[in-house]
Image (tube, rainbow, N blue to C red):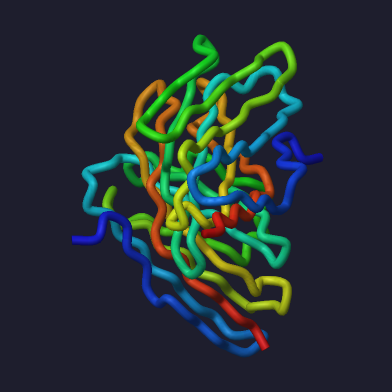
Amino acid sequence: DTAVSQTPKYLVTQMGNDKSIKCEQNLGHDTMYWYKQDSKKFLKIMFSYNNKELIINETVPNRFSPKSPDKAHLNLHINSLELGDSAVYFCASSRRGPGPYEQYFGPGTRLTVT
Amino acid sequence: DQQVKQNSPSLSVQEGRISILNCDYTNSMFDYFLWYKKYPAEGPTFLISISSIKDKNEDGRFTVFLNKSAKHLSLHIVPSQPGDSAVYFCAASLTGGGNKLTFGTGTQLKVEL
């Protein structure tokens, strides 16, 4: 009964490929997020969604496209992968409202682009 | 421009002693602060938070102190246990900011026997 789950945990792919990472939460939260942790271990927000509506989009290349089929899922699709996309990607969720509220993170997906 | 900074990349403490992790921020609009703990190959786990209307919040062995005038917060763990060995991230957000968390770069805590 994992609260926030991500698949796959590891993803190795070649430059130029398109890949997706899936995220699901069973906490009943309305808001979901994607974060990227780069090689310097710096965690930075990419996107957030409130009940399928895009709220935050942090100057991320448009090769990255989040998709939220329902409020429990937020998937990340990446087109034309580049070497610099190699990182750990974390999904998170939180309550919705005036907040702020703590966020609950998934275990991460380590993406390696060769 | 890093708005949340953790200037100590690592800290080593003996079991049973106090661990003090520090965090500084530059954006005076931040009004909610959080600490997360992260083990290798896992996601960050929420530990404790504090609103800017308070200067202290306790939860068991963990206490967070906030000094708004200095734009500084600290996490005290007492007594420290070997299982506390992890990377600790502080994070900040502001009301009306879409619940966006701005993270520091983390401090690796090692609690030695």
Quarter where residue A91 is shown: bottom left
- Which percent across, then down, holds residue B27? 72, 24
- Front in this rendered view, residue B39 or A57: B39
Horizontal side, residue A99 vs residue B109: left or right? left
Furthest residue toward left: A1
- Which percent across, then down, holds residue A81? 64, 78
Residue that appears at 62% across and 43% down: B103
Q: Is residue A97 above or below residue B16?
A: above
- Front in this rendered view, residue B11 or A47: B11
Furthest residue toward right: B1
- Which percent across, then down, holds residue A3? 26, 55
Q: Is residue A21 above or below residue B26?
A: below
- Which percent across, then down, holds residue B31? 56, 19
- Front in this rendered view, residue B29 or A48: B29
Q: How many marks?
A: 0
Residue that appears at 42% across and 76% down: A9
Residue that appears at 38% across and 57% down: A74
Q: Is residue A16 above or below residue A31?
A: below
Residue that appears at 37% across and 73% down: A7
Horizontal side, residue A78 vs residue B29: left or right? left
Q: Is residue B52 above or below residue A50?
A: above
* Quadrant occupied by the N terminus of chain B: top right
